[in-house]
Structures are given as structure tokens and as C-alpha cells.
Amino acid sequence: MPPKRPRSGSPAPVRLGGLVLFRAESGENDLVVTFLTRERGLISALAKNARKSVRRFGGGLLSPGTAAWYDFRIREKRDLAFVERGEANPKAPQLPPDPLIRALSAWALELARAFEAPRNPAPLSFNLLLRHLGALSRAKDDAPPRLLARSLSLSFTKLYMELAGFGAGLEECSRCGRPPEDPGLYLITLNDPRVVCPRCQKKLPEGVGGGAARFPLPLVEKLGKIKDLKNPVLFSLEELEAAENFYRALAAANSGRRFKSPRAIKGLLEADSPPDPPEGGKVGEAGNKEGNP
Ligand SMILES: [Zn+2]
């Protein structure tokens, strides 16, 4: 080990509240961890020896979904910062071991990782994500088909996408500008996730609009009522399935990313649900295919 010497160019450590979005192993002992912070948006930081250091990062402080205090050394001209230690925040939400809650949290973390930027302060996203993880962690006793946990996730997704500048545009048809009316708007869930009214949908070119999910008017209105996460809105199973698919496609199309958590969520929900009837019992399966594999 080379002797430790204070280098003139070494930045002073700064303590920030951070939320762990992602981590990857680096070399034999290190981790590269992506945090979301209020003050500096995304911070990607090298945690030296973190795979061994129980003292500096004890209690899973570098696990995705953890919110705590972290000491960073941020080098202004480099993308990679250093994180030197973490300290638990007793007020931060503790995610339960419930696999679906974990998977829904992973979706929220993936969204933030896809849409936030380094050095771009993100107080609203940070607060929204923290509040959402708190609500999710309290929804662990939600019985299958997990309508509460999924409704919380949908509400978060709707608000987060608006915050990121990629809201669904439910107020009007993206082609003719008409407001929603019965029998509701249609949403194209494949390559081009946009709100299109039934009238315009008939005029779409061949091949566009495949896999469209119908958003009936009550669903559009219900989504429109979500302004914050304070009062949870409960959605039905049909509403959830249509809206979840649409928002996943919307996030994928606007970020150019492949999200991993939707597949895990789907698998967990299928494992929770009663077995399918033997023949022809799966209604609407083809129409619900996601745009992103
Ligand atoms: Zn239209």
C-alpha cells in the first residue's frame, strides 16, 4: 500500500443525503455505486474496499433502495466521485424482504437512474422517490393481486414521468388535440407510446398502434387526479394492467433503455395468481405484450 498523503488537489469530503439506485462490482474489493442526491442529482461513486468494509458501509448502506448519509469526495472534472463512508438515517424507509415490494422499488430506482442527470439538482425527484419507497414499504401486507402496492407504483410512475418531462399527455389526443371523451382514449403501447383518440386511431398508418391498450375515460380521470403521493388512489386489476404496460413503454421509448424490473414484477405476480384455466382462459394476452422485452 502506498503511504497516504494529502494531495493538494484532493477535494474535501462533503456529506449528502443519498439514495442508492444501483451498484456494480469493480475489481476484487470495490463497488461503483450510483446515488441520487437532492443537491447534485446523480452521483456515481467508487466505494473502495466496500465489499469487505463492514465498518464504513455496515448494515447494507450500499444496497439499492437504501437512503442514508454519505461522505463523498467529488472531483468536479471527473464523472466518478469517491464515497468514503455511510451513516444510517433512522428516519429513512426500510424496505421489507417482500419480493414484490423489492421489485416495484427496483422499477422506481431504474426510472430515476434512467432520467436523472449528474450535477443536476433533483430535490423533487429525490423527495418523490423517498416518499414512494416509504409508502411501498408500508404496503407489504397487501394481499394478491397486490392492488395497493401496484397502485402506489403506478401513481409514482405517473408523477415521476411528469417530473422528468415525459408525462403521458392524457389531457388530449396527440394527433387531433381533442380532450378525452367516451369511449376513452387509446394508447399505443409499442414503439410510439402516445395518447391517440379512437377516431384518430382508425386513421393511423398500417402497423402503427399495434398492441394498443385502451384507457377508458374513468381511468384517464383517475390518473388525472393523482397530484402527489399523499392520498393513494386504488386501481382495479384491468386498469393496472393497461396503465402499467403503457407507462413501461413510455419510459422505455423516452430513455432508450431496457428496464429489467418489469420482467421480475411480472414473474412475481404470475407466481402469486391462481393457475390459468386449461384452454382459452387467457383473455387479452396478445394485447398486453410490452414494448420492451
Ligand atoms: Zn384524435
Image (tube, rainbow, N blue to C red):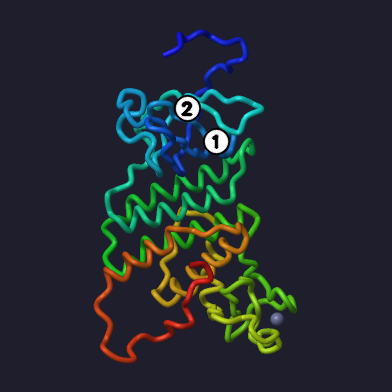
Q: Which mark is residue 20?
A: none
Image quarter for ligand 1 equals: bottom right
Residue at 40 percent across and 43 percent down: it is 64
Q: What kind of residue is marked 2?
A: Val
Residue 43: mark in rendering: 1
Q: Residue at left 43%, top 41%?
A: 24
Mark 2–mark 1 distance (CA, rounded to whole Å): 10 Å
Specify whether 115 is left or right of 232: right
Q: Nearer the viewer, residue 283 or 93?
A: 283
Which residue is tagged 2?
83
Q: Are marks 2 and 1 in contact (CB under 8 Å)?
A: yes
Tell me if residue 187 comes above or below residue 11 in the rendering: below
Q: Of the residues under marks 2 and 1, which one precedes in the sequence?
A: 1
The reply, left or right, for residue 76 in relation to residue 220 is right
- For this rendering, which residue is in front, 14 or 46? 46
Q: Residue at x 32, y 28 (%)?
A: 52
Viewport quadrant of the N terminus: top left
Q: Local crowd at mark 1 within 10 Å, few (<14), some, or many (≥20)?
A: many
> Element type at marker 1?
strand
Q: In terms of image quadrants, where is residue 107?
A: bottom left
Q: Nearer the viewer, residue 127 or 250?
A: 250
In the image, residue 139 above or below residue 77: below
Disc 2 residue lies near ligand 1 with CB under 8 A: no
**Residue 258, image x and y in percent?**
52, 59
Q: Please state the horizontal and vertical placement of residue 255, each as a whole percent of the image.
A: 60, 57
**Residue 102 at x, y percent in the picture:** 35, 53
Q: What kind of residue is marked 1?
A: Ile
Q: Residue at x 44, y 71 (%)?
A: 240
Q: Position of residue 54 (x, y in %)?
A: 30, 27
